[in-house]
Image (cartoon, coloured by chain):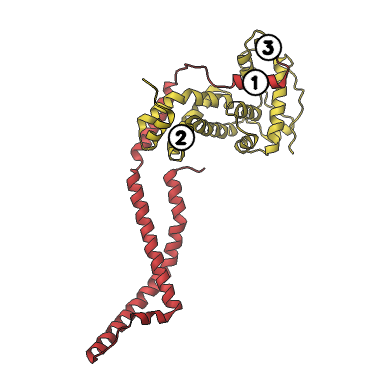
Amino acid sequence: MTDHTGLGDLERQLRQALAGPPQGEEPSAGVVAAVMAQVRREAAERPAWSARRLDLLVGLLTAGIALAWAVVNLGLTLWPGAGGLLRVPAESVLGAIGWWIVKKAGGTLLTLLTSGVCSLLPLALVSFLALLPLAFWFDGRSPS
Amino acid sequence: MPEVPDQTLARQAQAGSVEAFEALLTRHERRVAWLCERILGNRADAEDATISACVKAWRWLRRYDSSRPFVPWLLTIASREALTLARNRPTWTSLDDLTAGEEDVRPGGGGDPAEAALAGETREALLDAVARLDSLSRAAVVLRYHLDLSYAEIARLLEIPPGTVGTLLHRARHRLRGWLAGDEGDSAGKVTVP
């Protein structure tokens, strides 16, 4: 007769009893069918991995450009002298007038762009960075 | 023809092969269902947990590290799913219930465990006895002796303090031993939370 009194023996018996289902048991056709129906539905809805990678690449590229633009604008704001690096010598009256127009138009355009982008950029950047982990989460659909 | 290893099938499934996943599911569905039934204590709930766990396994397949065995990964998902379902059942015993001494001792599922043990049906008797444990202790016993999880892992899954797992298991073993010896009373006392 089996000894049921020792705790060590009980542990061994528990491991044996809880080792798993009896060998050779057939899988439940109903469960397999229910799971596979759901899996097939989700597999059909799931976009191809290459498409997801392209989305990610475009997103990162956009963020990269936005970040570079922000850094350039910040640099020009903190160090206005940097603009002098772009100055070309005006050797003629025509050249001087041309350069004055370019400077005025360029300056106006740059001011417009800078003020517009600088006001929207931080918001866009923060939103993008905040949404990026969420996009990964949805992509993996795993909370762990 | 040799059987295709689990890891190979899992890699194919990770690449999007529904057929490979179906092969894995067919191969291991019984184990998942068996584990869920041991934790939940009934077949109907176990079936729901099995379906849910297997669908989640498909969704999370990209997180599976194919250099490691597939079955433990699948069974961990199954145990989490079964425990989530168990917690939403009115029969779930919380740690508070156990410390208060209110226990969910279920009627024997397939006859008197002591009689079955005497007849030499030790495995069935033990499974019956485990099924009679309160839900929290039952889950701890199954996670320990089927999945061979550490106390820390069990504590995390059951959402109880790590120090309580040892007490819970110790008490469960005492009760099982008492039942198998034919003693219907509970001589092990209450669970103490450190």
Q: Nearer the viewer, mark 2 or mark 1?
A: 1
Q: Position of residue A128 (x, y in %)?
A: 43, 58
Q: Residue at x 39, y 62 (%)?
A: A64
**What's under tag 1, amino acid-wise?**
Arg
Q: Which chain is yellow?
A: B
Q: Chain of mark 2?
A: B
Q: For marks 3 and 2, give the one nearer the viewer.
A: 3
Query: Mark 3 and mark 1: span between their CA atoms?
Result: 12 Å
The lab-note entry on whether marks 2 and 1 share a chain reads no
Quarter of the picture holding the C terminus of chain B: top right
Q: Which residue is under mark 1? A: A12
Label 2 vs label 1: CA separation?
31 Å
Helix, strand or loop under label 1: helix
- Judged left or right of residue B36, residue B102 is right
Judging by colour alone, the chain drawn in red in this rendered image is A
Looking at numbered disc 3 in the image, what kind of residue is underneath it? Answer: Thr
Report, in whole angstroms, how far the alpha carbon at label 3 lies from the one at label 2. 40 Å
Q: Position of residue B160 (x, y in %)?
A: 66, 38
* Labels 3, 2: one chain: no
